[in-house]
Image (tube, grey):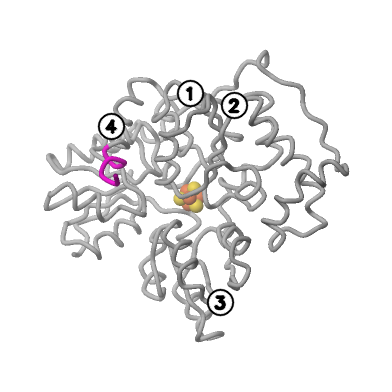
Amino acid sequence: MPMAGIYGPDDFDNPLHRHPAAQPRSRVSPAARALPMPLLAWTPEVERTTAHLYQRVKNVISPIEWPFMAPYIKAINELKKTRDAVILAHNYQTPEIFHCVADIVGDSLQLAIEATKVKSDIIVQCGVHFMAETSKILNPHKTVLIPDSRAGCSLASSITGADVRLLRQRFPGVPVVAYVNTSADVKAEVDICCTSSNAVQVVESLNAPTVIFLPDQYLAKYVASKTDVKIIAWKGACEVHERFTGDELRAYREADPSVQIIAHPECPPDVLAEADFTGSTAHMINWVRNKRPKRVVMITECSMADNVRAELPDVEMVRPCNLCPHMKRITLPKILDSLVYLREEVTVDPLIAERARRSVERMINLKN
Ligand code: SF4
């Protein structure tokens, strides 16, 4: 179905767009709750207690790098127990985080669902701010920490709740679906959330002839190509995935006609047209696990290829290394600081959180 239009902030006279008051806030927890900083030396004991973890990442982390990481990994894993904390890590986190300190890993949908089952008092979100907000929305009585609250997202910052209200005025009665890559403020204004795993299913679940889909224009185009529902889109884009080009993919295939190319639906249409498979990060990982191609190009954030390669050393990864600068703000030293000082705590206005929770839970219940 052709798209029914793409709108952006320039199409509305919206003084609240990117207004600081519309953005979520994090606050630093009181230093009174701090624990002593552990010693961070590479000792025989650190080497022994982390040896089994190094086995998980030895294909992607060199023996020279490991002595700098292992003391942090040991300290973080011990502090998790002291703090009764759980670490959630997105697929785009680096291998030493993803494979060595995370308790739960996955894409946005998997993390959102797992966040509802967490028993620990503290959640440390290794991902970007909207993911930590989603965990807080689903766990209002828990402490949710993000190791660096500047870890944003070009999609989440492309739209505000006020923009959604203006879209509703322009298209009265048309239901609104928000990709989870949005602020709590936006989630509070929409009918239901979706991820790249379930976007088509969510759009069709509304039984409406036309749906407003925001904020990713490329995911919206991908959804429009898979459904008869008319899609009205927003002009947002992921700054990582929009950098890929169809020419780049054709060059990979010319260099090796047997290579398999798999792409994330946040990529532009000319990129998806060249791919052998399109899917969310979770679907891409499962595709590689099941097909076991000899060589694969993963058209998505670079660290995911490292994480899959650590698990499947027989698959050769060709890595067009587009890094997400926001995901890369999360590091082992910052995770340790987060657990020692209980920072940075993510808060969401309770009234916004209650409305945003309805949109997220509607998606989760659909999935279940
Ligand atoms: S990879 Fe793209 S969508 Fe994901 S957090 Fe980074 S900017 Fe946002």
Q: Which image quarter is the N terminus in? A: bottom left
The residue wearing badge 1 is: 142
Mark with earlier residue (1, 2):
2
Q: CA distance from mark 4 to mark 1?
A: 18 Å
Q: Main secondary structure of the magenta part?
A: helix
Residue nearest the viewer, comparing 271 with 44 = 44
SS label for mark 2: loop
Region of the chain picked out in magenta, as a range: 362-368
Name the residue at 21% across, 55% down.
Answer: 231
Name the residue at 73% across, 53% down.
Answer: 54
Mark with earlier residue (4, 2):
2
SS label for mark 3: strand
Mark with earlier residue (3, 1):
1
Q: Nearer the viewer, mark 4 or mark 1?
A: 1
Q: Magenta includes 164?
A: no
Relative side of 331 to 294, left or right: right
* Res. 295 mark: 3
Amino acid at the residue labelled 4: Arg
Relative side of 99 to 91, left or right: right
The residue wearing badge 4 is: 358
The residue wearing badge 2 is: 84
List x then y, in percent, for residue 282.
44, 56
SS label for mark 1: loop
Mark 1 Cα-neighbour bin, 10 Å: few <14, some 14–19, many ≥20: some
